[in-house]
Amino acid sequence: MPERIEDYALVGDGETAALIGRNGSVDWLCWPRFDSDACFAALLGRPEHGRWLLAPRHAPARITRRYVPDTLVLETEFETPDGRAVVTDFMPPRGGASDLIRIVRGLEGCVPMWTELIIRFECGSVIPWVTQRRGGDDTELRAIAGPNMLTLRTQVQLRGEDHRTVGELDVAAGETLTFVMTHSPSHLDPPPPFDVMASLDDTLAYWRDWSGKCRFEGPWRDAVVRSLITLKSLIYAPTGGIVAAATTSLPEEIGGVRNWDYRFCWLRDATFTLLALMNAGYFDEAEAWRGWLVRALAGAPDQAQIMYGVAGERRLTEWELDWLPGYESSRPVRIGNAAASQLQLDVYGEIADALHHARLGGLQSSKEEWAVQRALTAHLEKIWDEPDEGIWEVRGARQHFTHSKVMAWVALDRAIKAIEAYHVAGPLARWRELRDRIHAEVCRHGFNRRMGSFVQAFGSEQLDASLLMIPLVGFLPPSDARVGGTLDAIGRHLKVDGLVRRYHTSATEDGLPPGEGAFLACSFWYVDNLALAGRHDEAREMFEHLLTLRNDVGLLAEEYDPRARRQLGNFPQAFSHISLIDSAHNLSASECPKPARQRGQST
């Protein structure tokens, strides 16, 4: 049985990431990229599907852990009747081969510990060929299957038992033992050993230097910095693409089927991400993300997708791993994501808004960038009035989702602003007329007068938390009675124990069985709406409640079950942390940029 989702912490090297439980087990790691097959997949099954345990031999009396402040270096302290020991886990920023390093250090007494290594390539299905050699006091283990090779170097003696590798170590106060696991191609010799403690110092310095550039100042700075570090850890450094999460198939309801692969880059996150990075002072990452966005979209506009691989790959075929039982029996386990082929009109608005704010933020633009945006806008002219699958990627029939039409309006509005402000070429009069027409259509068909609220889809009587974006993107001002009515309706009908659900899954035909947790990004949007409405005390109270939902090392998944009091969905979730960053800016009393006003302003 894997740990609870919130009992995991993340370490990464800028190209992949590992999840490590409070129990000292690495239960998820895909090598060499975020979207590669996992070599440790116990998170979605059992230990025999791959894990690396390093922990006391007997149940510890107490476990505490933390990230070294302002870094992605994890420390887990185990206290036992025999003493105390700390395990330091980290991945040095990728500079060639990829390494996962574990350092055990005795603090008090002598702690009996053990390690159990179960390597299973191709998501738990392939047992590698393992060889071992000793040289002096060191052990080197190699595990090979097909193109993959893992090399483990340590001072601990290891032995093979039933397709596992195990070893015991008694860690005395002042003693330090190291484990270095390296991934490399199987047809090459493994990289040579290196100074582990120097690598730790370099990794700490790297993260402290990066974190020190954060220019947010406020009462929630620690939470913002941790979220920014988490976001940085989900950036695929070679291209600038940002994965939605490090995992696949963690369920939105325990035992349910809403289990999706999130190890890809969604265009929908574009503006949220860009502003979160630029407002905090991280213009290099923002520019890399904008560059990835434009490259991914390059090509025929009618072939644009809503998500891509980390290098811009388009083929994200979805299939099921029937040999994995799923997280707490939540099946199926999916690789790939069929939503990549859906029509989601809202992404056109997000793309245009991201490029608009990149220009406003001073990121260098190009003729090619405007050419891509103009081509996408021209294509949107032809399809904006079609039904689509919408922001939540329903797997049922297409609908005329109100949010989708609002974001189509955003796409036209930002293209018009580019022509007006930067004098680029485009059909200004025609796009102004279409922008006004879409606005009128949304107000006529997306607003329910009896309910006093905008609704999920044209002619519907269902609510949807995506409607909270209406004032945030400037479609209507916060003072508009229809905006206030929508906020109040969502507060009455979609809030559960202080958190906001996306919509009622039992009432919306989304092609899936009902049931999921509260969507954390939507809860942060609700905070932003409260702030825009001048309800600052309510906004701050709700925001601080959301902060309490983070796990002990400050991480958030996609959703939260307020009844069971546990995190749900893929983890850690970029969208949740980006929304936290944006809300902290919106609520700050300082002069820092306010994303809710940046997106809603008229210039």
Image (spheres, grey):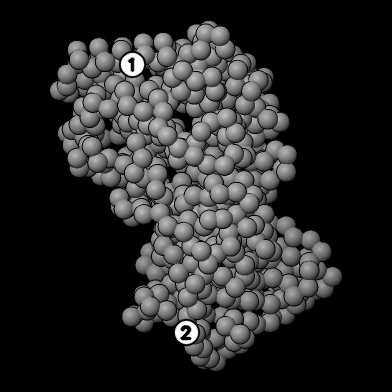
Q: Which mark is residue 267?
A: none
Would residue 293 be found to the left or right of residue 537 on screen?
Answer: left
Please name the amino acid that badge 1 sits on.
Answer: Ile
Determine which of the numbered discs, if any, sits on residue 438 in the image.
Answer: 1
Q: CA distance from mark 2 to mark 1?
A: 61 Å
Instruction: Give percent across and percent down for residue 387.
Output: 36, 28
Q: Residue at x 50, y 79 (%)?
A: 127
Residue identified by numbered label 2:
129
* Of 300 and 330, the residue lying toward us: 330
Of 191 and 525, nearer the camera is 525
Residue 412 in the image, given as x and y percentages of width and height: 29, 21
User: What residue is drawn where x is 72% and y is 43%?
Assistant: 565
Q: Quadrant of residue 408?
A: top left
Query: Judging from the image, what secondary structure is the residue with disc 1 in?
Result: helix
Q: Nearer the viewer, residue 21 or 98?
A: 21
Residue 386 percent location from the top left of the image: 32, 26
Q: Is the N terminus in the top left, top right, bottom left or bottom right quadrant? A: bottom right
Would residue 440 be visible to someone looking at this image? yes
Q: Is residue 14 visible?
A: no
Of the residues shown, which amino acid type is indicated by label 2?
Trp
Front position in the image: 389 or 13: 389
